Amino acid sequence: MRQRAMAIAVALGLAGTGLACSSAESNVVNQYFTALRANDTNTLTSFAMVAFDKKVDDYKIVSIGEEQKTPASLPDLVQKQKDLEAQQADNLKQFRAWGNDLAVYPKLDQVKEARSAGKKIPGSLQPIAEKYDAFSEKDRELKKAVAEAKDAVAHERRNTLLSIGPQFEDTVDQMKGDVISKEISLNLTINGQAQPYVMVLRKYDLDPPDGGRRMVSRWVVQSLVPKA
């Protein structure tokens, strides 16, 4: 009986050690690879921004880094998109005002017709052609910048909502606060070989725009890449 009691005590002590070693971060790692093994895309996309295209036979957490805190960037990204869209609209407005000028549009038509026919632009029309090209080049640059800004907003908005919950979709663009990041060093066994990887987790500690309490956030898998 005494030996049995000692065995139970040891078992409980080991279980307590395991619980002490567990953490929210390690739970996310376990959930990630469990979903990955099960090919459970729905679960994976509910808390991860990235999937993994290799079969992982085993994984081990080597270390969990310290928290890194930076200001939440979504409000600034949204404002940047709006500013670029305003610049694009203003450029188009200026082009239309210039191109519709009675002293300009007949010459502009001649420039377009000459280019369409593959003919050389006469010297007298060069100033019109150059200004038209300047408007067009600026429009292309702004369209590209706006598209990139929209992608950045969409990516950060999705990341944020995965952490704080979809119920804040209508107000998330205005929420300020902090982004907390952690790097987790992993050993992934792929094709029988242990390979070092780094997983980055993020969670969002934000203030609701109505001045209420900060919401409860969760860790989101931001990236999983080979360790440099």
Image (cartoon, rainbow, N blue to C red):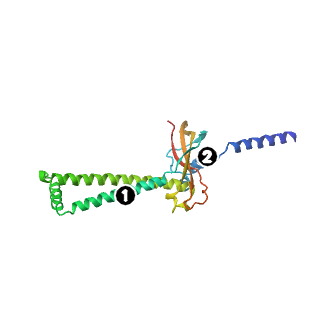
Along the viewing direction, whichever of 82 and 162 lies nearer the viewer: 82
Tag count: 2
Upstream in the sequence, badge 1 or badge 2?
2
* Amino acid under disc 1: Glu
Residue to which mark 2 is pinned:
25
| Mark 2 neighbour class, 10 Å CA radius: few under 14, some 14 to 19, many 20 or more | some
Q: Position of residue 188 (x, y in %)?
A: 56, 40
Left or right: 160 as drawn, with respect to 14: left
Left or right: 130 as drawn, with respect to 23: left
Image point 32% across, 59% down: which residue?
90
Q: Position of residue 28 (x, y in %)?
A: 60, 48
Residue 221 visible from this viewpoint: yes
* C-alpha span from label 1 to label 2: 39 Å
Q: What is the number of the mark on residue 66?
A: none
Q: Is residue 94 above or below residue 24?
A: below
Image point 49% across, 51% down: which residue?
73
Along the viewing direction, whichever of 209 and 122 lies nearer the viewer: 209
Along the viewing direction, whichever of 81 and 102 lies nearer the viewer: 102
Q: What is the number of the mark on residue 85?
A: 1
Location of residue 1 (image quadrant): top right
Image point 67% across, 44% down: which residue?
22
Along the viewing direction, whichever of 29 and 54 lies nearer the viewer: 29
Left or right: 98 as drawn, with respect to 206: left
Q: Position of residue 178 (x, y in %)?
A: 55, 50
Q: Position of residue 127 (x, y in %)?
A: 17, 52
| CB under 8 Å between discs 1 and 2 | no
Left or right: 86 as drawn, with respect to 189: left
Q: Residue furthest right?
A: 1
* Amino acid under disc 2: Glu
